[in-house]
Image (spheres, grey):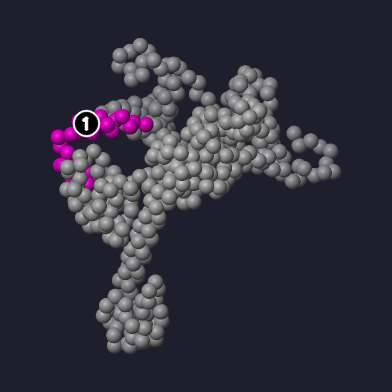
Amino acid sequence: MSDPLAILVRVFDGWREVGRAEVAPGVVLTWSGGIEPPLEAECEWFEPVDRVQAAFDRVKRMEIRQRLAEAAKIEALLDAYEVAVADVVDRYGRSTGGRCGPAARSFLKQVAAELTMTEGAAGHLLDAASDLRESMPATWAAFLEGRAPWRSVDIALAQSQGVPEDRMCEYDDLAAQAVERTHAARLKDRLRRARERLLADTATARRNLAEANRRVRLEPMADGQAAIEVAGGATDWVPVDHALTAAAVAAKGAPGETRSIGQLRHDILLDIVIEGLKTGALPDPATKVVQRKGVAVELLLTVPVLSLLGKDTALASIEGYGPIDLEKARELAAEAPSFVRVLTHPLTGARLTMDRTTYRPPADLKRWLRIRDQECRDPGCRRPARHTDRDHITEWQHDGTTDAVNLVSICRAMHLLKSLGLWQETLHPDDTVTWTSPWGRTITDPPPDPASPAPKHLLEPDSDDCPF
């Protein structure tokens, strides 16, 4: 039995229906005589093609179109960088130039806002594209022509690190073929193997360089969780991983222990880290940092008082992460030796001030800024407020006051750009911060995670009862 289907002709960026025909089920009619058929094409110019194959062909066409658009965007990014930096250098002097200079840093802040990405991601995109264009022309051409996606050429560039100049041409030729023909699941491994064959005589030096970039990074996750990423030498962390498993297996055999091996591995490592940070290092030559001093492992928890009293369901929050469930907040509050009470506006939830009569008086103003700002107020930065500078909006030398209405928490990099006069910030009454770039464009940082307003039924104007 036949199935009536439209005869479709691909015209520029879509399909146009030009007629109908009776064809077998599961079949569509497509042009087969060239890249584009004439608009007045007749039925005999078409041949039946499986519908599934036509659907896959459309996916492939969309992928190529996206690759070409991405290439155009990245070329525009490179052009914008040259124009913007030249403009700042003309206005502020040659000392602001250079890839690490204030002009480049300001450009990345601005373009990160335009592209809704982090400054680090924008900087990587800029640097990777510049390096590819200069050092890997064959791979760059494959990208510009839509033969390879950005994600593949980015991997190829990363694997080129450490390849000496006299071998780059050979590596580039291998990479240009690999990014076009190799499955994504195998690309990184294939390129790594190709690089290792080229650089067998420099393995030790490359390992030393990689270990110099060891780091620990926290990544907030959903549902009150967070991930710690540790990047370092395999000879250090592989035996630690094995030892954690052995310790978890041993603990699993204890009477009444119901946790899984994965849960025990996590909890054992957490115990070791917390207790180790508290106690400091012993004078042992085997210790990595022999001068390390013990530090407090502190959690800053904000709990709406109405929620604590069971009159509201607004979530609590912790510094450096954000909202957490009330059950966990109450558990933490029950274990806390003291509190810092925070007053929030009952209608807007904005943090207004804090109680300065804590059990252990801290540096009140610094602690208040940590509570209010939570992190660097530069929208492109996620540095916790406790690790930032307290910046005077109106500079101290210009009669700026040292109080909450004239201070914001910003990282050292943004502080330097602001002090040079390239960026200006404005703190609004609702804790919004507006930044103005050297080019007059503005970026807004909204109040960080304001508390939930009090329930309306507790704020009736004719009510004489205090809700708490």
| Side of 92 relative to 54 (left or right) | right
- Per the picture, the main secondary structure of the magenta-coloured stretch is helix
Up-down relation of residue 126 to residue 395 (above or below): below
| Side of 74 relative to 410 (left or right) | left
Q: Position of residue 49 (x, y in %)?
A: 29, 77
Q: Position of residue 192 (x, y in %)?
A: 22, 43
Q: Position of residue 259 (x, y in %)?
A: 42, 33
Q: Quadrant of the C terminus?
A: top right
Give the residue displayed 42% in from the left and 24% down from the top: 273
- Neighbor class of circle 1 (other Cα within 10 Å; few <14, some 14-19, many 20+) is few
Say whether residue 318 is visible.
no
Amino acid tagged 1: Ala
Residue 42 in the magenta stretch? The answer is no
Q: What residue does disc 1 label?
A: 205
Q: Residue furthest top?
A: 283
Nearer the observer, 96 or 355: 96
Tell me the quarter of the picture where residue 248 sits: top left
Q: Position of residue 250 (x, y in %)?
A: 34, 26
Task: Tell me how many marks there are.
Answer: 1
Name the secondary structure under disc 1. helix
Tell me the quarter of the picture where residue 399 sits: top right
Give the residue displayed 39% in from the left and 32% down from the top: 216
| Side of 208 relative to 320 (left or right) | left
Give the residue displayed 32% in from the left and 72% down from the top: 54
Q: Quadrant of the N terminus?
A: bottom left
Give the residue displayed 15% in from the left and 37% down from the top: 200
Q: Which residues are magenta?
A: 188-215
Residue 193 in the magenta stretch? The answer is yes
